[in-house]
Image (tube, helix red, strand yellow):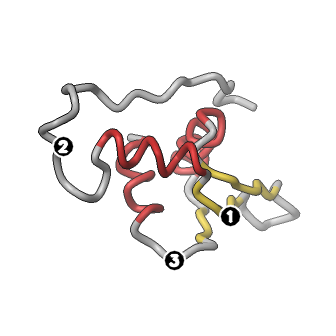
Amino acid sequence: MAHALFKQILMTRLPMRFYSPSEIDRLKDLRDAGYIRVVFSPPQGAAAPSATVHEVTNLGRAAARYFGSGDGPHPDLPSVTFVLPCRHDPAG
C-alpha cells in the first residue's frame, strides 16, 4: 500500500533508493499525487530498475500532517481515509 511506503519515506533520511517493482509502482502513485520528488532509473543491461526519492514535497508534508501519518490521530480533524489517485499505467 502506498500509504505505508509514504510513512516509511517520512521517517527515513533522504535520499532513499528502492529496487522492488511493486515499491516503484507505489512511488509512481505518490509522485502523481504530488507528495514526493523521485527519479526513476531504467534498467541497464543486467541491472534492475530503481527509484530514488529525493524529497517529500510541501503538499506531501501537508497531507502527512492532515492524515496523521507518523504522529498519531488528530481528534480535532474529521475522520478521513488516506487515498492516492492511481494515474499511471503499471505496465509502462
Q: Nearer the viewer, mark 2 or mark 3?
A: 2
Horizontal side, residue 43 vs residue 72: left or right: right
**Residue type, mark 3 in image:** Arg
Spatial CA span between label 2 and label 3: 25 Å
Crowd tier of the residue under label 3, counting other residues whose Cα lies within 10 Å: few below 14, some 14–19, many 20 or above: few
Name of the residue lying farthest toward the front: 76
Is residue 58 or residue 40 the one in the foreground? 58
- Image position of 82 (left or right of 57): left
State the residue lying farthest toward the bottom.
Answer: 13
User: Hey, what amino acid is under mark 1?
Assistant: Thr
Q: Which residue is the site of mark 2?
A: 74
Q: Mark number for residue 26?
A: none
**Residue marked by disc 1:** 52
- Element assignment for label 2: loop
How would you rate the neighbour count of disc 1 (Cα within 10 Å): few for under 14, some for 14-19, many for 20 or more? some
Percent coordinates x, y for residue 78 in the rendering: 21, 26
Residue underneath mark 3: 13
Tell me which residue sits at (24%, 58%) in the image. Answer: 71
For this orientation, the residue located farthest to the right is 45
How far separated are the C-alphas under marks 2 and 1?
A: 31 Å
